Image (cartoon, helix red, strand yellow):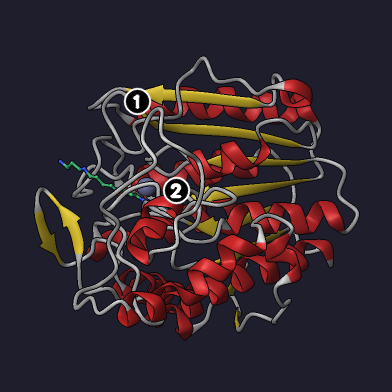
């Protein structure tokens, strides 16, 4: 299978992440993608290609211009305001306040952020833009008739909503790729999110639509980030009613139980009759992931790939999370090798 990759991901290299009341080295770091690409090359998975540049239009099919303008200009405005550290929001439009963007960058950060762990830095925008182009190039390969492609996206995307960033995500790569396929002839796309965390951004973007089926297997939001979305009761609204399926699972969930969820997801996808499948591929379900609580082992990712292949659909894998950096290459590439059989 072809991998789409660019070294521009390294432009996302924050110094700080707010974690446990301290500023720590970010979990979402450049070495993650470097371990994955190294493993792909070692294993000879297939060609590694640079992304093409599709420009802003397919990004604006998902994210409004005011949001991308904010992401592009936030760092400059933060520096202009005289702040010394990386840009971290501290104030939000909380319950019963007003949904209106303030003028000051400190307030604007809270307006556009889901959460405070994700620092904005000088070249974050350039990396996020490149990551979206990686996903778009993968989508284009499927349009051209490839049966599968791996978009080695970094930074990840599934927490980003149309107009909010956070959870290490800025632009929703999987949503941008899915929409690109829909805009170029696909009638229905299924998005299966197997990252440990609920794909709140992807769910929110497609919640009222019937041309995208969104399914997520994840740590129960009562116990895990993003905390405020991803419950089983959320099933879509309006035309989208019945086109969202959430399968939250408790701390300690093993592969045997997780795989039953995967089977449920795949049978719903088969019923839906999609033209293509986008897999939001996080491997933070791994037993040794430092911020997650599932118990999948490295060999389970091979089985996961096999199960996904049995769905027999054109499949775009878009990289999301996974923070056990030493094992991320093995775990992610195991899914792809299992898929190829
Ligand atoms: C793409 C992706 O995987 N994003 C994950 C974002 C998680 N951000 C918040 C982390 C809060 C972690 N709390 C961990 C408790 C560890 N014992
Ligand atoms: Zn995750």
Considering only vertical position in the picture, is 297 above or below 269? below
Relative horizontal placement of residue 141, taking residue 92 as reference (left or right): right
Q: Which residue is mark 2?
A: 302
**Residue 169: x and y, percent?**
44, 58
Point 75% across, 21% down: residue: 238
Where is residue 268 drawn, in percent x and y? 67, 24
Q: Is mark 2 within 8 Å of ligand 2?
A: no
Callout 2 crowding tier (Cα within 10 Å): few <14, some 14–19, many ≥20: many
Residue 277's label in the rendered image is none
What residue appears at the point 61 percent right and 20 percent down from the top-left corner? 235
- Asked whether disc 2 touches disc 1, contact meaning CB atoms under 8 Å apart, the reply is no
The foreground one among 61 and 108 is 108
Mark 1 — residue? 220
Along the viewing direction, whichever of 88 and 7 lies nearer the viewer: 88
Relative vertical location of residue 59 with respect to residue 50 in this rendering, above or below: above
- Indicate the position of residue 171 as horizontal and vertical percent values: 54, 61
Q: Which residue corresponds to the image point at 58% horizontal and 32% vertical from the top-left? A: 215
- Residue 220 figure quarter: top left
Q: Secondary structure at mark 1?
A: loop
Identified at 26% across, 35% down, the residue is: 295
Where disc 2 sits, the SS reads helix
Q: Disc 2 and disc 1: Cα gap in Å? A: 24 Å
Q: Earlier in the sequence, mark 2 or mark 1?
A: 1
Mark 2 or 1: the one toward you? 1
Q: Is residue 340 visible?
A: no
The answer to which of 192 and 20 lies nearer the viewer is: 20
Tell me: 170 left or right of 309.
Answer: left
Left or right of 188 in this view: 65: left
């Amino acid at each position: 299978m072809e991998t789409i990759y660019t070294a521009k991901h390294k432009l996302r290299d924050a110094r700080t992440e707010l974690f446990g009341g301290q500023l720590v080295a970010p979990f979402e770091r450049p070495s993650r993608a470097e371990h994955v690409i190294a493993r792909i090359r070692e294993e000879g998975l297939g060609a590694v290609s640079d992304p093409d540049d599709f420009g802003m239009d397919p990004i604006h099919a998902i994210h409004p211009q005011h949001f991308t303008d904010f992401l592009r200009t936030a760092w400059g405005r933060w520096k202009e305001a005289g702040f010394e550290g990386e840009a971290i929001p501290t104030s939000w439009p909380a319950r019963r306040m007003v949904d209106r963007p303030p003028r000051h960058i400190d307030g604007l950060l809270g307006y556009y952020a889901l959460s405070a762990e994700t620092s904005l830095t000088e070249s974050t925008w350039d990396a996020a833009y490149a990551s979206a182009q990686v996903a778009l190039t993968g989508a284009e390969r499927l349009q051209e008739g490839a049966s599968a492609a791996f978009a080695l996206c970094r930074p990840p995307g599934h927490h980003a909503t149309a107009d909010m960033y956070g959870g290490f995500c800025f632009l929703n790569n999987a949503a941008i790729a899915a929409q690109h396929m829909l805009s170029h002839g696909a009638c229905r796309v299924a998005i299966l999110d197997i990252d440990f965390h609920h794909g709140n951004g992807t769910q929110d973007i497609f919640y009222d639509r019937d041309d995208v089926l969104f399914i997520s297997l994840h740590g129960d939001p009562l116990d895990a980030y993003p905390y405020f979305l991803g419950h089983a009761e959320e099933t879509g609204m309006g035309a989208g009613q019945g086109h969202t399926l959430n399968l939250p699972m408790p701390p300690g969930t093993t592969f045997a139980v997780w795989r039953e969820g995967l089977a449920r997801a795949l049978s719903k996808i088969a019923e839906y009759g999609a033209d293509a499948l986008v897999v939001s591929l996080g491997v933070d379900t791994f037993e040794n992931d430092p911020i997650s609580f599932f118990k999948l082992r490295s060999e389970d990712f091979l089985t996961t790939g096999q199960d996904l292949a049995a769905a027999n659909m054109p499949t775009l894998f878009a990289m999301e999370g996974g923070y056990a950096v030493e094992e991320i290459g093995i775990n992610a590439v195991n899914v792809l090798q299992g898929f190829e059989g």
